[in-house]
Image (cartoon, helix red, strand yellow):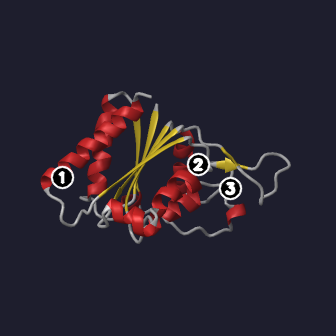
Amino acid sequence: MNALFVIGHPAAGSFSHAMANAAREVLTGAGWRCIWHDLYAEGFNPLQSVPESGNVTSDDPLVEAHCTDLAAADLILVFHPNWWSQPPAIVKGWIDRVFRLGTAYEYPAGVALDGVPRGLLRAQHALVFNTSNTPPVRERAVFGDPLESLWRTAVFGLCGVSSVKRSMVGPMANSSDAQRAQWLHDVRAMVREISQV
C-alpha cells in the first residue's frame, strides 16, 4: 500500500513536519510504503504556465514525479499551515499543477469542459493536517473554515476520494509542550485508524 505525504511548510522544524513524521512512523510500522514530498525542500515550482484545460503534461520532471505518485497513492496525507484561511501558495500551486486533467480527473465521453468531471484517483482516503494561530472554533464560526471545503469538496471530492478527514491544531503561538505532545498523539491515532480500514 502506498501512502503519499505532501508537506507544505517552509521551516524544516515546523509542527507540520512533526505531524508528518509521526504519521510516517505509524504507517511505516504498519507496512505501508511512504512516498515523501516536502515541497519547499524539493524546490517545487508552483507556477502553472498553461491554462487549466491544457494542463495534461509538463516538461518539469518533478511535476511528472508528483503526478505519478499521486496516481499510485492508496492514501494521501497533506500537512500545511493555515495562512489567511488558505494553504500556502506552494501548496495551491501543487494542486494546480498535479491534480490535473488525465491524472486526477477526466471528462467522460460526450461531456464538455463545462460539465461534471469524473475523479480518477485510486486513493479512497485522504488526511489533511493543518496548523493555525486561529482557534479552530473561531475559524469555523467567523471564517467558515474554507480549508475544509477546499480539501473535502473542491479537491479530493472532485477527484474521486470518498473519505476525507481533516484536523486543524492551534493556536500554535502559545501552545505548550504538553499540548503539542497531545496533538501528535491524536495524529498517530487518526492515522492508525485510517490505515486499518
User: Are discs 1 and 2 less than 8 Å apart at CB?
Assistant: no
**Image height of 119 relative to 54, above or below:** above
Instruction: Identify the residue at image location x=46%, y=69%.
Output: 89
Distance in Å between CA atoms under marks 3 and 1 = 43 Å
Amino acid on which the number 2 mark rests in the picture: Gly
- The answer for how far apart the CA atoms under marks 2 and 3 are is 20 Å
Q: Position of residue 186 (x, y in %)?
A: 28, 43
Find residue 8 and report its horizontal and vertical position in percent. 39, 59
Viewer can see residue 64: no
- Taking the spot 27% from the left edge, 60% from the top edge, the residue there is 170
First in residue order: circle 2 vs circle 3: 3
| Neighbourhood count class around disc 3 (C-alpha, 10 Å): few under 14, some 14–19, many 20 upward | some
Q: Which mark is residue 15?
A: none
Question: Which residue is label 1 attached to?
Answer: 179
In the image: residue 92, left or right of residue 10 = right
Check disc 3 and report the residue beneath it.
56
**What residue did someone put label 2 on?**
157
Q: Secondary structure at mark 3?
A: loop
Q: What amino acid is labelled 1 in the image?
A: Gln
Image location of residue 192, percent across then percent down: 34, 33
Quarter of image, res 86: bottom left
Could you tell whether 178 is left or right of 13 in the image? left
- In this rendering, which labeled residue sits more in front, label 3 or label 1? 1
Is residue 132 found left or right of 101 in the rendered image?
left
Sequence-wise first label, 1 or 2:
2
Q: Earlier in the sequence, mark 3 or mark 1?
A: 3
Number of other residues with Cα within 10 Å of mark 2, as a class: few under 14, some 14 to 19, many 20 or more? some
Residue at 62% over, 70% down: 49
Mark 2 or 3: the one toward you: 2
Secondary structure under tag 2 reads helix
